[in-house]
Image (cartoon, rainbow, N blue to C red):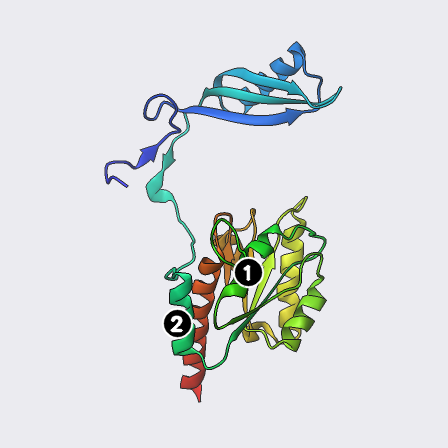
């Protein structure tokens, strides 16, 4: 980033012109009144000169709008604080070599989509052999035993299976939730670990479209990965933390 750029606005046609495009649904029919309601909503959001560039009915009583306009708001980049995973990302081959050089036995990664979440696309992309977007999943990694429990796994079952398989890393996927149910479910798992005095026994990582590292740390997890992250991102973090954890344990002896 250029040192000269500190205050920024959205960019549409020219730099810092403040042009934005937003979309939303309203519980009104798709007609002239609906469009006026959409423009008024945009105005209340601080968007100047809003125009409806697209509208379509969703049903007799609901409609969808895309609104274009201008904002005056600026963001001071120097005031922003970013919480992100601090680990060196390695390739599959580098991870396999790292495990061979630093661990005597295969590492066990166990994962699931927990609670009421039946969507397994995220956990499958990380765990399953075929992986996602040309990046293999953990099942294909030498030195890693990957156990995918699938979807709708309750917290108690996940912990029970983690203990049974002597897991080193627990992966939790929360792909789709409503009304922040995933927050409650993720919080409950950490509380369960602490109640069973097992929190320090595992590296616990969460992932999903609505997950970020800042949220993960706030909830008591070791790391959080959002969209566009792959098995090598997760494994790179886990094995480096595990090496450091083992080093500290040896120093205490």
Question: SS class of the residue under badge 1?
Answer: loop
Q: Quadrant of the N terminus?
A: top left
Please say if 56 is above or below 106: above
Q: Which residue in the rendered view is the most extreme toward the bottom?
A: 253
Instruction: Please name whichever residue, 35 or 239, is drawn nearer the observer in this view of the structure.
Output: 239
Q: Is residue 181 left or right of residue 11?
A: right
Residue 188 in the figure: left or right of residue 214: right
The quadrant in which residue 64 appears is top right
Residue 24: percent from left, percent from top = 60, 27
**Measured from the top left, where is residue 253 in percent x and y?**
44, 89
Judged by depth in the image, the label closer to the viewer, 1 or 2, is: 1
Q: Label 1 neighbourhood size at 10 Å, few (<14), some (14-19), many (20+)?
A: some
Q: Residue at x 53, y 55 (%)?
A: 131
Residue 105 at x, y percent in the picture = 49, 80
Q: Quadrant of residue 163?
A: bottom right
Quadrant of the rendered structure where residue 113 is?
bottom right
- The image position of residue 11, as x and y in percent, is 37, 27
Circle 2 is placed at which residue position? 98
The mark total stands at 2
Q: Which residue is located at x 45 percent, y 60 percent? A: 232
Q: Which mark is residue 129?
A: 1
Distance in Å between CA atoms under marks 1 and 2: 20 Å
- Left-right relation of 148 to 253: right
* In this rendering, position of residue 164 left or right of residue 49: right
Q: Secondary structure at mark 2?
A: helix
């Amino acid at each position: 980033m250029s040192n000269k750029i500190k205050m920024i606005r959205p960019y549409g046609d020219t730099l810092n012109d403040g042009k934005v495009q937003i979309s939303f649904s309203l519980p009104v029919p798709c007609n002239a009144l609906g469009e006026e309601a959409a423009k008024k909503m945009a105005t209340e959001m601080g968007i100047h000169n809003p125009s409806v560039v697209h509208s379509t009915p969703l049903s007799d009583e609901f409609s969808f709008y895309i609104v274009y306009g201008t904002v005056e708001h600026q963001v001071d980049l120097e005031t922003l604080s970013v919480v992100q995973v601090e680990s060196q990302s390695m390739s599959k081959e580098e991870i396999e070599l790292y495990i061979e050089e630093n661990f005597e036995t295969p590492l066990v990664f166990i994962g699931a989509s927990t609670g009421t979440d039946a969507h397994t696309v995220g956990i499958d992309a990380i765990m399953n052999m075929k992986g996602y977007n040309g990046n293999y999943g953990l099942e294909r990694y030498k030195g890693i035993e990957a156990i995918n429990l699938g979807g709708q796994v309750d917290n108690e079952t996940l912990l029970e299976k983690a203990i049974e398989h002597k897991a080193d890393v627990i992966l939790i996927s929360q792909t789709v939730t409503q009304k922040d149910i995933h927050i409650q479910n993720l919080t409950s798992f950490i509380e369960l670990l602490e109640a069973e005095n097992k929190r320090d026994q595992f590296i616990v990582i969460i992932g999903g479209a609505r997950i970020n590292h800042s949220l993960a740390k706030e909830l008591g997890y070791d790391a959080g990965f959002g969209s566009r992250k792959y098995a090598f991102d997760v494994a790179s973090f886990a094995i480096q933390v595990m090496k450091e954890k083992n080093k500290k344990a040896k120093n205490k002896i």
